[in-house]
């Protein structure tokens, strides 16, 4: 059950006249990335149960990944998003790694300031040298994290069932280790 | 004595009719880790005095270690946890170290924003090359930190008695140095 | 539509007597940089539709890039800026990279504390060895980000249309990757 | 004069009936460190003028150095400490340096959130290879910083008199440079 | 015009009876530094127009550079400083660089929490190998930043006039680049 619904059930028990506010999943991406990560995330969400009825998707595009944090914060505070998927692509130069670090720290702080999850979905330009492989990492990771966002709001048991299983987004799962 | 009980005794002295709120220990883990760290922590807590009576355990699973901080914050603010054990496994690539840094910074900030301890329990995938040894580090460290959480709430003298003794979680204790 | 206008339309619907407050774009630069980045940004904004009528530009100069964050924060809080373009030049020594990191973290935090975008426009002194090339990076990047600021306030569809297209500021666009 | 006393004199001038609240110096250390740093700090404070009369010492032990920040914050907010000495020992592996960084950032933030000084006293395990030398660094640095805490509250002129003198804790003083 | 004066003119227009509060410039330095940076800063401020009449200087010394941030914050909040010059000397070992980073992050956060500029004036012990040269860097940089503080409060046009001119503190100016 989502935070929004939970709150409602606590504070306004059995006030049936008010229609439940539709849950909102935010998707924010960048012009800088070399793949339309936002489209992949939105495509995945469109296949989730309740799309358009139980939840709707709010989309936004910013210039680069350093602009994701405040955009996600405003999508939560002003647009009422219950969770946000923030997608970006750090480049391969050392300075890009540093910028990715700053962008990730911002996304972390935005989560804590809003008490709301923002799933950081970064694909580093140097994760694969083959452009086709890299493109598939973009598509796969963006979709998997969009699905995670849906699970976090509506099916948290999907997550607890997979605890410690070495689950990956973008590449194959690593699998669990055995104690003996 | 826990914070919750202490507060109660200060503000509502001798109002006997209200049953004391059970202390809550949160355990949050990830799908990404290759070992069921949350299970190990919960197993340890189940052996602590007062389990189920003086305190209960709240459990949650998130996708990866960067999602631990806001989850722990919400377990404190919304679920009323008095302490949280946050368990995750950073991978071995350089970018994983950077991500672990961001995750750890988030956990630190969540503690300061809630004025509540969150024990960060990270096992780095490259701490041991032998999968069996690594699995035992996962099991041991998760359990030891769960025990620490219990001590912090109920038996702080266990901690002060061990001050400066080179205590370790996951490997053998390092022991104290001597001045002369 | 800008935040300021949006708020007004929500809270004071159809109160026609009050003239709409002009949108403000802040431009803050440094004495330290070796190019007049603020001038380039202001020149670009002067070519945007509505310059002087729909929006006006507030300018400020600080000593170095570490002074940008609090200056931008005050331009938002005290001068009423709706967005700020913060321009600086990190030097090429390792310590300069560390300082750039601190400056960038400050700009990130200032955004989250004000819930307002601050576009960080940094040109690293070692991005090009030829002074003429470097000067053109300064001019181009400052202008492109000033244009981005304008788009974010008045034409967000310009951004969403370019999502995932590998857009760059300062150098040629990298372009998008193809999945197949 | 301490903050606490100063405030009192401002807001409750000449209300003689209330005994002045005793100043509190917090000392928080870890089980992880290989030397009883807290004991050294407390021993030094016990030799300071006014020990037990003008000020008293509050002590606490946490598992590791990452747990110092929130503990110090709570010692200030809940136990009324006017300053805290936070003592820990980062290990020598690269990951330990990263963890020390996170712990130090937390202590920094705890200071800013409480507007109260927390003296970070870290002895890195690799500062000396000889265990006896290392032990003496532990003892000396812990004592010197405990003395600094006392000076900050009661004798700030001891600090200003030593401005720019290359004062060290744990090793010999470096001394001042001369302009000519 | 300073923030303090600006506020007064806005909220208490033409209430002539109240004498204007003197502007306060804070100077905080350390025992750790090997040069009396605070003295150099205070000497420079003593040569600025209005010293002692329009503005006065508040001075403080702390143990090391990690103690600067909370000291500056309290000089703003409790002593009413309108700007603070924070002076310190990071050592040359790798761990010193990390500590300098933490100290600088703290100063950055203190600025954002108080919405007040704190000029970070760090001279790294390894900026020059010749002690005489290093001493001159200390003297020069401390003075130049003290002057910057004065300009920011009383003559901001001095800063905007030098925008993008490659101005340096401690060494010779780098000068501007030309586009063509």
Image (cartoon, coloured by chain):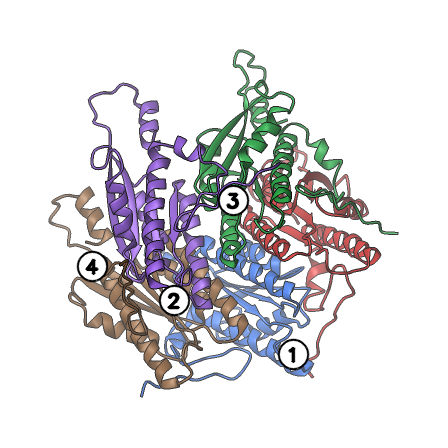
Chain colours: A purple, B green, C brown, D red, E blue
* Disc 1 target residue: E135
**Marks 4 and 2, Cα distance to the nearest angstrom?**
44 Å
Quick one: quadrant of the C terminus of chain E? bottom left
The front one of E51 and A128 is A128
Which quadrant of the view contains residue C44?
A: bottom left
Horizontal and vertical percent position of residue C95: 54, 71
Question: Mark 2, residues whose alpha carbon is within 10 Å: few (<14), some, or many (≥20)?
Answer: few
Q: Are marks 3 and 1 on the same chain?
A: no
Chain of the residue under label 2: E
**Marks 3 and 1, Cα distance to the nearest angstrom?**
41 Å
* Disc 4 target residue: C161
* Disc 2 target residue: E1
The secondary element bearing badge 3 is classed as helix
* Disc 3 target residue: B107
| Residue D7 sits above or below residue C105 on the image | above
Of callouts 2 and 1, the N-terminal one: 2
Residue furthest out toward the front: A180
| Residue E148 sits above or below residue B173 on the image | below
Horizontal and vertical percent position of residue D126: 72, 59
Horizontal and vertical percent position of residue B16: 56, 12
What residue appears at the point 64 percent right and 83 percent down from the top-left corner?
Answer: E133
Question: Mark 4, residues whose alpha carbon is within 10 Å: few (<14), some, or many (≥20)?
Answer: few
Residue furthest out toward the top: B17
Question: Mark 3, residues whose alpha carbon is within 10 Å: few (<14), some, or many (≥20)?
Answer: many
In this view, the mark in front (1 or 4): 4
- Callout 2 touching callout 3 (CB < 8 Å): no
Which quadrant of the view contains residue E44?
A: bottom right
């Amino acid at each position: 059950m989502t935070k929004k619904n939970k709150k409602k059930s606590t504070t306004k028990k059995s006030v049936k006249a008010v229609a439940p506010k539709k849950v909102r999943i935010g998707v924010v991406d960048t012009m800088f990335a070399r793949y339309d990560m936002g489209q992949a995330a939105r495509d995945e969400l469109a296949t989730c149960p309740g799309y358009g009825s139980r939840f709707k998707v709010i989309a936004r595009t910013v210039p680069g990944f350093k602009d994701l944090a405040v955009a996600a914060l405003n999508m939560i505070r002003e647009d009422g998003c219950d969770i946000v998927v923030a997608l970006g692509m750090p480049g391969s130069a050392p300075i890009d790694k540093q910028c990715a670090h700053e962008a990730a720290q911002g996304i972390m702080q935005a989560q804590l300031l809003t008490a709301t999850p923002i799933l950081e979905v970064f694909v580093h330009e140097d994760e694969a040298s083959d452009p086709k492989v890299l493109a598939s990492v973009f598509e796969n990771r963006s979709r998997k994290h969009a699905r995670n966002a849906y699970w976090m709001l509506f099916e948290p048991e999907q997550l607890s069932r997979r605890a410690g299983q070495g689950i990956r987004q973008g590449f194959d799962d690593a699998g669990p280790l055995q104690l003996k």
